[in-house]
Image (tube, rainbow, N blue to C red):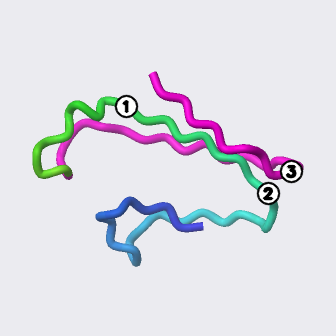
């Protein structure tokens, strides 16, 4: 699995090995207001949590 943002250079992107399976993912992010007008610089952060599941589930989006 490749982990990359839309402006990342794909050959240099982070990679992790995972076995074929059904997975769930939780994406956490914060400090988005720190992003500069160029859309690239800031103190924003992102955390991806990935775990196996037994079945496909509905996508749920939570916003503050």
| Marks 2/1: CA–CA distance | 27 Å
Using the image, determine if residue 34 lies above or below residue 22.
above
Which residue occupies 53% across, 41% down? 27
* Residue 5 percent location from the top left of the image: 38, 59
x 39%, y 74%: residue: 10
Q: Position of residue 2 (x, y in %)?
A: 53, 67
Q: Residue furthest top?
A: 64
The magenta stretch spans residue 17 = no
Report the disc number at residue 22. Answer: 2
Note whether 14 is above or below 49 in the view shown: below
C-alpha distance separating marks 3 and 2: 7 Å
> Dot 2: what SS?
loop
Precedes in sequence: disc 3 or disc 2: 2
Q: Which residue is mark 1?
A: 30
Q: Mark 1 or mark 3: which is in front? A: 3
Relative horizontal placement of residue 15, taking residue 51 as reference (left or right): left
Q: Is residue 42 left or right of residue 5?
A: left
Q: Residue at x 74, y 53 (%)?
A: 23
Q: Residues within 10 Å of mark 3 (few under 14, many from 20)?
A: few
Which residues lie in the magenta part?
A: 40-64
Q: Secondary structure at mark 3?
A: loop
Q: Which residue is denoted by mark 3 in the rendering?
A: 55
Compared to 46, does 2 lie above or below?
below
Nearer the N terminus, badge 2 or badge 1? 2
Marks 3/2 in contact by CB < 8 Å: the verdict is: yes
Q: Quadrant of residue 4?
A: bottom left
Of residue 42 and residue 58, the one placed in the foreground of this image is: 58
Q: Residues within 10 Å of mark 1 (few under 14, many from 20)?
A: few
Quadrant where the image shows the N terminus: bottom right
């Amino acid at each position: 699995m490749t982990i990359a943002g839309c402006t990342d250079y794909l050959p240099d992107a982070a990679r992790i090995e995972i076995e074929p399976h059904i997975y769930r993912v939780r994406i956490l992010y914060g400090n988005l207001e720190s992003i500069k007008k160029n859309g690239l610089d800031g103190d924003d952060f992102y955390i991806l949590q990935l775990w196996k599941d037994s079945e496909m589930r509905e996508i749920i989006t939570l916003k503050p």
